[in-house]
Amino acid sequence: MTSARQLYLYIVKKITVYPEKESQAITFMLLEHYMRLRNIDVLVDRPIADNAAQPDWDNIIARLNNNEPVQHIIGSTEFCGLEFRVSSSVLIPRPETEELVRMVTRDYAEPDKDITILDIGTGSGCIAIVLARFLPHVSVHAWDVSDEALKVAQENARQLIADVTFAKQDMLNMTLPLPGSIPQFDCLVSNPPYVTYSEQEHMRPNVLRFEPHEALFVEDSDPLLFYKAIADFGTHYLKSNGKCYVEINEHFGSETKKVFEERNYRNVEILRDINGKDRFVRAIWG
């Protein structure tokens, strides 16, 4: 018979590509997912029966040491208290994006008639689904250019019982106004690609090798490409006094603000994340 602490120490020691604190956090995630062992079980050294079902730990550790994200190994991650399926087709949701969602939920917490929100570049669906769950009085739409991402997002919406209307749309190849029936929105929200290719050298292998580059990177020659497209779209499809919220590259805060100001948005603000970095722009149309 082994114990929770023995297993914990074995896994932490075998993970070699992360700093110790990160290895410890990853190990807790693995023990919770595969063994239903919590942090307290490790602390009190709970016994593990010899016949308890366990995964192939050596295989999992080898995948981790090959820089495969732990979220891909277990197939899911937590975001705003909900469990989301993730794959190599979508970005793993980040804590900063939780802050973006909280910003929107605070501004739209009061029930109002016919509030409609569009999540642009939905990926795993995390933003749209959390908004649909936390703001049941709001109608939520979500767009992405990737068929595979939309499949993941739709599965997450089914699993989490969230009412979201998904559609395939390419923000970079739109002729505005769009043909057909596109609703007017009260709110646009987006975490678009904003990392420049020159920033790759500062990024970790688990991101570069296993997460979709089309959801991460923009050319250094036009780092604000997606913000221009989103802002242009809003001039046609945001209602008067409608709001736009975007997550941004910390190095281009003032430049991103200017994109919206040049298109006659008002009250354009740069907002910082929990680490004090320029991380969001919020703007009002009309």
Image: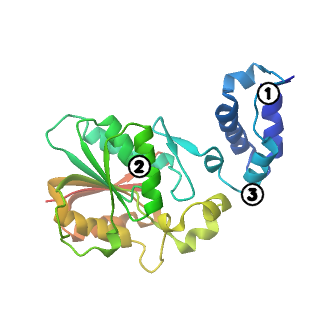
Rendered residue at 41%/41% (across/down): 158
Q: Quadrant of residue 191?
A: bottom left
What's the residue type where badge 1 is placed?
Answer: Arg
Looking at the image, do the residues carrying marks 1 and 3 touch, with CB atoms under 8 Å apart? Answer: no
Q: Nearer the viewer, residue 25 or 84?
A: 84
Residue holding disc 2:
154
Q: Could you say whether the residue bearing mark 2 is in a helix, strand or loop?
A: helix
Q: Earlier in the sequence, mark 3 or mark 2?
A: 3
Q: Amino acid at mark 2?
A: Gln
The mark lying in front, picked from 2 and 1, is 2
Q: Secondary structure at mark 3?
A: loop
Q: Which numbered mark, 1 or 3, is in the foreground of this view?
A: 3
Where residue 73 sits in the image (x, y, percent)? 66, 48
- The residue carrying mark 3 is 66
Q: CA distance from mark 3 to mark 2?
A: 30 Å
Q: Residue furthest bottom?
A: 221
Q: Residue at x 43, y 62 (%)?
A: 147
Quadrant, the C terminus: bottom left
Q: Check disc 1 and report its element: helix, strand or loop.
A: helix
- The CA span between labels 2 and 1 is 38 Å
Q: Is residue 189 left or right of residue 41?
A: left
- Alpha-carbon distance for marks 1 and 3? 25 Å
Residue 254: image quadrant is: bottom left
Q: Position of residue 189 (x, y in %)?
A: 32, 54
